Image (spheres, rainbow, N blue to C red):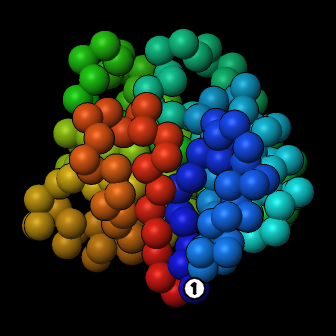
Amino acid sequence: MFVDTHCHLDFLPQPAQQAEQARLQGVGAIVVPAVEPSNFEAVRELAHSLPGVGYCLGLHPCSVNGLEEQALELLKNQLEAHHADPRLLGVGEIGLDLFDQGLRQDRMNHFFIEQLRLARHYELPVVLHVRKAQDQVLAGLRRFGIRQGIAHAFNGSEQQAQAYVAQGIVLGFGGAKHLHPCSAHSSSCLLAV
Ligand SMILES: [Zn+2]
């Protein structure tokens, strides 16, 4: 069976039909990460209404420019309320994007670190978005002792890939052909289990 570890189903026009098509092709489970508070409800509803779908809650690095500090508080409250939900699979999508020059690095770092703290607290895996920041993200994972998760559209070196795997992180390579994975919302990562 295949697991799609990174699919923004809620951004697709007909999520139920598209999830069903994937299921018929052998994709037995789909993980739908959130990107900011405005889609927390949507991903949770999808996970609870479609078979084989789980969700994550998190603040995407490409979203943080437009987010207030209270978004972190909101995420924390949501994780507190739902961390025992069997459909909640992790904290994501979180990470660092140093490729996109328009993003505020201090803010991105702050949001990333605080979300790693939450993942650690609730003992949840992380769904990572990493661009030109492989070593920085790895340092964060080590600092908080996070040893479960997936990095989607991974494009680091072989040595960096080995370091991620040693940290317990599964690597996805889908979407690498896209110039900008933030907008490549169909960049699914399939994992055979
Ligand atoms: Zn994504």
Q: Secondary structure at mark 1?
A: loop
Residue 92 sits above or below residue 166 on the image: above
Q: In the depicted view, which residue is nearer to us: 49 or 135? A: 49
Residue 119 sits above or below residue 105 on the image: below
Q: In this figure, what is the number of numbered marks?
A: 1
Residue 54 in view here: no
Residue tagged 1: 1
Question: Is residue 192 found left or right of 166 in the rendered image?
Answer: right
Residue 162: x percent and y percent?
19, 72
Residue 4 in view here: yes
Residue 20: x percent and y percent?
73, 64
Residue 185: x percent and y percent?
49, 40
Q: Label 1 crowding class (10 Å Cα cut-off): few <14, some 14-19, many 20+?
A: few
Residue 116 sits above or below residue 31 on the image: above
Please report the residue visible at 11 percent of the width from the left and 67 percent of the height from the top: 158
Q: Quadrant of the N terminus?
A: bottom right
Q: In the depicted view, which residue is nearer to us: 7 or 56? A: 7
Please report the residue visible at 28 percent of the width from the left and 66 percent of the height from the top: 164
Q: Amino acid at mark 1?
A: Met
